Image (cartoon, rainbow, N blue to C red):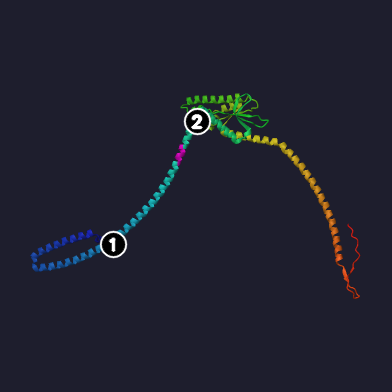
């Protein structure tokens, strides 16, 4: 670091020099009292000269200091400019990044807003579904509509009937008509949701056990009602189908109450959920298609026999046509022989020669022709 380039250092140096000069002048005054005026004048002259030289040196130092100060100021200005530019670039980059971040944030907020609306819609639908399921009649209608939709999706319209009256004057939710010799299948929709919900929402083990008993009693009653109402009717096959609209209830039955499933099978009732009911309907449709193919087998056989008769007649007619083609070929060959002979006779006629009269008379043409043989058809 250059101390002489600092103005404060120069000012301190000047003050120190002035103090030194003052001390020297005082010392000279004291000396003059001892050595006389002549010596004092010489000393003052030397002192004045040294002071002049020192002032000149100080001026040179001050000039250099001012020059260095200007360069320092210029360097400082350049650095400030560079820092200002860097700061401006950094602020611009930060502004762009901030703008992009705000744009991304706005897009995400829009997505969140749409998701929130979807959640609100879903919440309303769930609330409506809860209200629907809380009503026993509405819950029954819900299960029946779900059952009907599955049947309509898998079976042809002629294979089922809703709210059909059986021979024992009982009305079944759906009657599925299987082809002979199979009997029809009765399908009834049941939804024991209240007892199942009470069992799952029980506060303690005792309450859960009591609710489980009520749940199994309700399911057993549904099975018994289906078996007693529909199976005694004519042309109703075992097992009848009890449709549960809830996969959760069906899973709980198979997991925690397998004895209920076994009792229902022994009673002639099969308990199904939407997934297993779809598989059952798929099997029924395959049976219907197979029976339809068997029914149409004799029709296909009869049509094949008629087709074979038509093929035999076609073969006979083709053979007759081939015979006619053979006779026509022979006739054409005979015609070609006749036309060949006619062409030969025509060539002979074209070879006739003209003879002149040797007596000088008006030349006359004398036709000399070879004897023409009779043309016979062969």
Decide: few, some or many residues near mark 1? Use Cα within 10 Å; few <14, some 14-19, many ≥20: few
352 above or below 240? below
Q: Mark 1 sits on what residue?
A: 71
Decide: few, some or many residues near mark 2? Use Cα within 10 Å; few <14, some 14-19, many ≥20: some
261 above or below 314? above
Answer left or right for 321 relative to 276.
right
Answer left or right for 158 relative to 314.
left
Checking the image for residue 377, the label placed there is: none
The residue at the far front in this view is: 362
Is the stretch drawn in magenta largely helix, strand or loop?
Answer: helix
Residue at the image position 14 percent from the left and 61 percent from the top: 22
Q: Which is more foreground, mark 2 or mark 1?
A: 2
Q: Position of residue 117 (x, y in %)?
A: 45, 39
Residue at the image position 47 percent from the left and 33 percent from the top: 127
Q: Position of residue 170 (x, y in %)?
A: 60, 25
Ranked by sequence position, the earlier of labels 2 and 1 is: 1
Q: How far is disc 2 from disc 1 in space, using C-alphas?
A: 89 Å
SS category of the residue bearing label 1 = helix
Answer left or right for 72 relative to 128.
left
24 above or below 264? below
Q: Looking at the image, how many numbered discs can be counted on the residues?
A: 2
Answer left or right for 215 relative to 103.
right
Checking the image for residue 132, the label placed there is: 2
The answer to which quarter of the image holds residue 66 is: bottom left
| Residue stretch rendered in magenta on the structure | 114-120
Q: Quadrant of the N terminus?
A: bottom left
């Amino acid at each position: 670091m250059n101390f002489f380039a600092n103005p404060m250092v120069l000012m301190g140096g000047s003050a120190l020099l002035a103090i030194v000069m003052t001390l020297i002048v005082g010392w000279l005054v004291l000396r003059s009292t001892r050595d006389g005026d002549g010596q004092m004048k010489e000393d003052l002259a030397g002192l004045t000269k040294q002071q002049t030289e020192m002032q000149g040196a100080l001026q040179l130092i001050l000039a250099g200091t001012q020059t260095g100060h200007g360069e320092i100021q210029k360097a400082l200005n350049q650095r400030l400019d560079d820092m200002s530019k860097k700061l401006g670039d950094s602020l611009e980059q930060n502004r762009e990044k901030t703008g992009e971040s705000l744009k991304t944030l706005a897009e995400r907020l829009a997505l969140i807003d749409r998701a929130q609306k979807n959640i609100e819609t879903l919440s309303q639908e769930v609330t409506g579904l809860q209200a629907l399921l809380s009503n026993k009649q509405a819950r029954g209608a819900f299960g029946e509509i779900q059952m009907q939709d599955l049947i309509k999706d898998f079976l042809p319209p002629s294979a089922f009937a809703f709210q059909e009256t059986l021979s024992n004057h009982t009305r079944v939710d759906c009657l599925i008509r299987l082809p002979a010799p199979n009997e029809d299948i009765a399908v009834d929709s049941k939804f024991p949701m209240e007892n199942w919900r009470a069992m799952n929402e029980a506060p303690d083990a005792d309450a859960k056990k009591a609710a489980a008993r009520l749940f199994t009693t309700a399911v057993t009653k549904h099975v018994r009602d289906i078996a007693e109402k529909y199976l005694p009717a004519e042309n109703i096959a075992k097992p009848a189908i009890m449709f549960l609209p809830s996969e959760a209830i069906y899973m709980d039955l198979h997991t925690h109450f397998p004895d209920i499933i076994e009792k229902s099978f022994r009673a002639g009732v099969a308990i199904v959920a939407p997934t297993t009911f779809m598989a059952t309907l798929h099997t029924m449709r395959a049976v219907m298609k197979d029976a339809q193919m068997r029914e149409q087998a004799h029709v296909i056989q009869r049509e094949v026999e008629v087709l074979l008769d038509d093929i035999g007649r076609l073969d006979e007619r083709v053979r007759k046509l081939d015979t006619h083609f053979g006779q026509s070929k022979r006739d054409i060959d005979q015609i070609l022989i006749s036309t060949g002979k006619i062409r030969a006779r025509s060539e002979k006629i074209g070879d006739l020669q003209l003879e002149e009269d040797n007596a000088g008379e008006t030349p006359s043409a004398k036709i000399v022709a070879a004897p023409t043989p009779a043309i016979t058809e062969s």
